[in-house]
Image: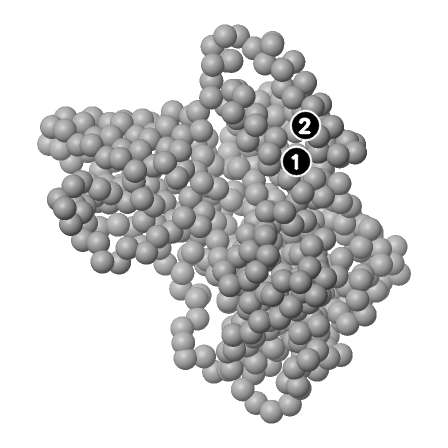
């Protein structure tokens, strides 16, 4: 569930990394953007191009985003300004006495945030100590398999224990948003780490780029959760063709939305023999997203009246979408709602960018996309009530995106309705949505934590699969 705006530049920076190893930077400027209780490091790296012009890159180390091209930069004796078109941001500041500090304002998405930049010797290093280093003590193979329903080819990596015999196997299914085979987020690579750990422990793993991502064919933007389920089943079908795989011991590991997709796949195919659900939703999207929003805003320190107003608006919007027969009908109702809300605002409020027609159009486009409409309407219980195979479901106690307090009981109740007695549910109290040990659970914290996955949680997953599938 990574599609949630919880910090000013959280989504804007994700996946915007550029490769610029050859650039020699002349100076580095670092500061902290504060938004409620959220604080994000920002680094401006200034250099000169081959023709002598001034240029720069912007980093957000806490989000694992580096070398975002600065569109325009201008430095005078007493001021510095720059803009970054790709994230719709700009900054203007004044040098303090001595020229080692700049005090100014960072603007993005209608927000004006104070930002003081200080000159530093080098950029902040993003450390990910759990990422495994080659050479690996197992076989790693690039593979391509076909989703015959939609006639697209998906590319991935199959890892196999380096020994003889047929192995149990798992398919890794990523969370929402276009994900590569490692489920890379903020320079974390959770699927690479899961794959490495399980393969070292005798379990084959297939992970793949989402459709339309990396080397996989297809169009991501027009796909729904149901389409991603077909991709997961295509991965299972591929594993069945491999002589190294025990076809009676193939399971699925789904994270976040992947924890929604995996039960759908299991309910549709007898070839799936067990499920590991990491931070899975147990309630419909139209209920989950307002809950996410409320918990995140509360943890950020937003006042209760603003939270209440925001959550009420979301619920109203989602009810309109969920109860509309098509996107055009929903759009007309949303447009009418928007006009009524704008009419009650002061002229000053009406002129704010976040209340303009462009902002409404952007939100409407997101809300009425095929994926979002399906996600709002879909109830996880529809698939879970038909899952009779072994299930391990694991949440973080500080997960603000799929909070266990609401999602675990709903998931357990649905599996009980299926008569499934082979279910293990676990809440690891100090973990967040990515299963990292954390302080607040806020998504803005994900990138600043060096740990990618809490090791005891990883061990729990491996032990359960070995017990369930009989891995050696």
Q: Is residue 201 above or below residue 179?
A: below
Q: Is residue 400 above or below residue 156?
A: above
Please tell me how crowded label 1 is: few (under 14), some (14-19), or many (20+) other residues with Cα within 10 Å. some
Identified at 56% across, 83% down, the residue is 161
Identified at 18% across, 27% down, the residue is 79
Please tell me how crowded label 2 is: few (under 14), some (14-19), or many (20+) other residues with Cα within 10 Å. some
Q: How is the image coloured?
A: one colour
Residue 247: image quadrant is: bottom right
Q: Secondary structure at mark 1?
A: loop
Dot label at residue 331 = 2
**Frontmost residue, 76 versus 194:** 76
Q: Secondary structure at mark 2?
A: helix
Relative to 249, 367 lies left or right: left
Q: Mark 2 to mark 1: distance in Å?
A: 8 Å
Q: Is the C terminus in the top left, top right, bottom left or bottom right quadrant?
A: bottom right
Identified at 43% across, 56% down, the residue is 187
- Measured from the top left, where is residue 47 in percent x and y? 18, 46
Relative to 34, 320 lies left or right: right
Is residue 149 visible in the rendered image? The answer is yes
Sequence-first tag of 2 and 1 = 2
Reading the image, the residue beneath label 1 is 368
Residue 83: image quadrant is: top left
**Frontmost residue, 349 versus 235:** 235
- Measured from the top left, where is residue 25 in percent x and y? 19, 49
How many numbered circles are shown? 2
Is residue 398 visible in the rendered image? The answer is no
Relative to 28, 157 lies left or right: right
Identified at 64% across, 90% down, the residue is 165
Dot label at residue 378 = none
Are dots 2 and 1 in contact, CB under 8 Å? yes
**Frontmost residue, 391 versus 14:** 14
């Amino acid at each position: 569930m990574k599609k949630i705006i919880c910090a000013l530049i959280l989504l804007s920076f994700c996946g915007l990394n550029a490769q610029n190893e050859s650039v020699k930077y002349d100076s580095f400027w670092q500061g902290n953007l504060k938004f409620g209780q959220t604080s994000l490091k920002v680094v401006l790296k200034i250099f000169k191009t081959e023709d002598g012009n001034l240029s720069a890159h912007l980093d957000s180390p806490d989000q694992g985003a580096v070398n975002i091209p600065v569109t325009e930069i201008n430095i005078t004796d007493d001021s510095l300004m720059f803009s970054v078109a790709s994230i719709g941001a700009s900054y203007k500041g004044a040098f303090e006495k001595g020229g080692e500090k700049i005090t100014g304002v960072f603007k993005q998405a209608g927000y004006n945030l104070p930002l003081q930049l200080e000159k530093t010797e080098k950029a902040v290093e993003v450390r990910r100590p759990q990422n495994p280093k080659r050479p690996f003590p197992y076989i790693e193979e690039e593979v391509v398999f076909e989703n015959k329903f939609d006639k697209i080819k998906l590319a991935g990596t199959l890892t196999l224990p380096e020994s003889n015999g047929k192995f149990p196997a798992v398919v890794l299914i990523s969370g929402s948003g276009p994900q590569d085979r490692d489920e890379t987020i903020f320079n974390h690579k959770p699927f690479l780490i899961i794959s490495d750990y399980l393969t070292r422990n005798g379990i084959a793993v297939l992970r793949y780029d989402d459709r339309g991502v990396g080397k996989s064919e297809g169009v991501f933007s027009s796909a729904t959760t149901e389409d991603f389920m077909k991709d997961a089943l295509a991965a299972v079908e591929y594993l069945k063709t491999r002589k190294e795989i025990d076809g009676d011991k193939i399971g699925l590991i789904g994270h976040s939305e992947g924890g929604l997709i995996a039960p759908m796949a299991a309910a549709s195919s007898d070839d799936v023999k067990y499920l590991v659900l990491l931070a899975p939703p147990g309630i419909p999207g139209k209920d989950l997203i307002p809950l996410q929003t409320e918990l995140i805003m509360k943890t950020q320190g937003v006042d209760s009246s603003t939270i209440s107003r925001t959550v009420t608006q979301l619920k109203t919007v989602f009810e309109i979408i969920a109860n509309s027969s098509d996107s055009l009908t929903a759009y007309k109702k949303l447009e009418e709602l928007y006009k009524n809300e704008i009419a009650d605002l002061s002229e000053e409020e009406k002129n704010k960018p976040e209340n303009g027609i462009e902002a409404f159009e952007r939100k409407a486009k997101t809300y009425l996309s095929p994926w979002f409409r399906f996600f709002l309407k879909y109830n996880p219980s529809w698939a879970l009530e038909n899952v009779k195979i072994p299930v391990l479901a694991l949440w973080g106690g500080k997960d603000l995106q799929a909070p266990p307090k609401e999602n675990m009981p709903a998931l357990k109740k649905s599996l009980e309705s299926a008569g499934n007695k082979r279910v293990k549910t676990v809440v690891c109290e100090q973990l967040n949505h990515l299963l990292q040990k954390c302080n607040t659970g806020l998504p803005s914290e994900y990138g600043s934590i060096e740990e990618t996955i809490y090791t005891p949680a990883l061990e729990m997953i491996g032990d359960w699969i070995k017990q369930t599938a009989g891995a050696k």
